[in-house]
Amino acid sequence: QVQLVESGGGLVQAGGSLRLSCAASGRPASSYAMAWFRQAPGKEREFVASISLSGGRTSITDAVKGRFTISRDNAKNTVYLQMNSLKPEDTGVYYCAAVQVLGDKYYPTSTYGYSYWGQGTQVTVSS
């Protein structure tokens, strides 16, 4: 089992940047595909980005493509979400998720693909 703790959220003006971190403990993060999801008030949780075991493969939702980047440092058991050119519509609680996998080809984009979740970190973008 793995425990996930997000950090790095906060209040930022539109056009600004934040970097979210997700620290994994309990088992090596290198055993897991990882992802970021977000949930705005009154809306369903939605996919933002996912990354394979090695970090060599990623998937990014169209709404943030070109602005957000997902990366990982398996030596530090940490996954990152670099968010640039933030918009008010990026506001929400951002969640880190993980699923144990055997290879590098599985890094789902659906909430149903993930077994473990962090508690979330709030991101607020003011206009």
Image (tube, rainbow, N blue to C red):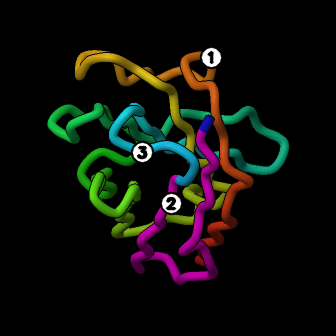
- Among numbered discs 2 and 3, the one appearing first in the sequence: 2
Camera-side residue: 6 or 18?
6
Q: What residue type is labelled 3?
A: Pro
Q: Main secondary structure of the magenta part?
A: strand
- Residue for point 49% across, 76% down: 14
Nearer the viewer's eye, disc 3 or disc 1? Answer: 3
The kind of residue tagged 1 is Tyr
Comparing labels 2 and 1, the label whose residue is closer to the camera? 2
CA separation in Å, label 2 and label 3: 10 Å
Q: From this viewpoint, which residue is outermost toward the left?
A: 56
Q: Name the residue under label 2.
A: 23
Residue 65 colored magenta?
A: no
Amino acid type at circle 2 is Ala
Q: In this view, does 26 lie to the left or right of 43?
A: left
Query: Reading the chain from its start, which is encountered first: label 2 or label 1?
Result: 2
Mark positioned earlier in the residue sequence (3 or 1): 3
* Quadrant of the image occupied by residue 116: top right
Q: Nearer the viewer, residue 31 or 14?
A: 31
Q: Position of residue 43 (x, y in %)?
A: 77, 38
Disc marking residue 28: 3
Residue 110: name its quadrant.
top right
Quarter holding the N terminus is top right
Query: Within the image, what quadrant is residue 78 found in?
Result: bottom left
Residue at mark 1 = 112
The residue lying toward the viewer, choosing from 96 and 44, is: 96
Q: Does the magenta stretch include residue 8?
A: yes
Which part of the image, by quadrant, shows the C terminus?
bottom right
